[in-house]
Image (cartoon, rainbow, N blue to C red):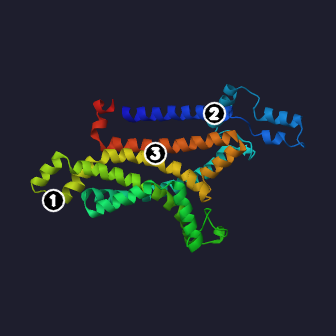
Amino acid sequence: MSFLLRRLLQAIFLLIGVSILTFLFSTLAPGNYLDEMRLNPQISAATLASLRAQYDLNRPLPFRYARWVNAVAHGELGYSFAYNGPVAPLLWIRARNTLLLTLTAMLLAWALALPLGIWSAERRGHLPDRAISLATATLMVVPELVLALGLLILAARSGWFPTGGMVSVGFAELSRWGKLRDLAMHMALPVAALVLSALPILVRHIRAAVAEELGAPFFRAATAHGIPRRKLLYRYALRAAANPMISLFGFSVGTLLSASLLVEMVMSWPGLGPLLLEAILARDLYVVIGGVLFSTIFLVCGNFLGDLLLYWADPRIRTAGGAR
């Protein structure tokens, strides 16, 4: 258990470090939320001074960070200047939407990448392998923004899918099946953009991991003894290739999360991406810090889940020597 405990402590220190750096950079950036209000002649200097005192903008940086940590301990994550309320309720709703989009895309991307990567590794050098390599190489050079815009153009011209948002206007009046169908239709484009952006990396890494095991001496020796190749592949080679694929799992969470923030803004998905952009433009300090912290928590949880799977799959890590 020392391996998992060490990973957990590293995750906690990472979150603390990210919170300090985000708070520092956001605070030291030029301007604040009250700068635009200062240009309004109807707002007096006394009102601005009162707001600065209310939001602790005239206090030293360590004091403001301590106040924010206290707010985090109470589950509030600070106070939003623009929304005039606690940050936590804003972020919980948006984070739930981002998780719904990211987890769906991640499960679908892995469900496609595993068979494609294994199939490509089995047929190294043949036509299917070359076709998959060409397709993944093409997708890798296409930016996520171009993919999202291309899918939006397709939806706008065909009318097959909604071009933005999460639900339709009359969503509350639909039946349960109708709500699920409406949500699925709105999720189709952003999920497709995320899957297409993550699929090439996953397929290539899975292919490389499986191909390495297929060329290992133990696999060639077992094949020479007449053991069926397919049995060796699914019973032994995949098990031997599990470690790099499990490590890739945590990396894929971070990749999909970073891509989802961009896709959410392009496709008007009400997740953390649009909220974070609005907070940055409005200089809403604590919403920015909370959004970055939530994104880091998702990434840390993905990596920690990968560590748990690795701990379960590899008995060497569970020994005292492997845990060091």
250 is higher (above) or lower (below) than 121: above
- Residue at (74% x, 37% y) in the render: 32
User: Disc 1 marks which amino acid?
Assistant: Pro
Q: Which mark is residue 25?
A: 2
The quarter holding residue 49 reads top right
- Residue at (15% x, 50% y) in the render: 220
Q: Nearer the viewer, residue 108 or 196?
A: 196
Q: Position of residue 2 (x, y in %)?
A: 37, 31
Residue receiving disc 3: 302
Note whether residue 75 is visible: no
Q: Position of residue 106 (x, y in %)?
A: 45, 55
The local crowd at label 3, few if under 14, some if 14 to 19, many if 20 or more residues have their Cα within 10 Å, is: some
The local crowd at label 1, few if under 14, some if 14 to 19, many if 20 or more residues have their Cα within 10 Å, is: few
Helix, strand or loop at mark 2:
helix
- Residue at (54% x, 53% y) in the render: 260
CA distance for labels 3 and 1: 36 Å
Residue receiving disc 1: 228
The local crowd at label 2, few if under 14, some if 14 to 19, many if 20 or more residues have their Cα within 10 Å, is: few
Q: Nearer the viewer, residue 40 or 229?
A: 40
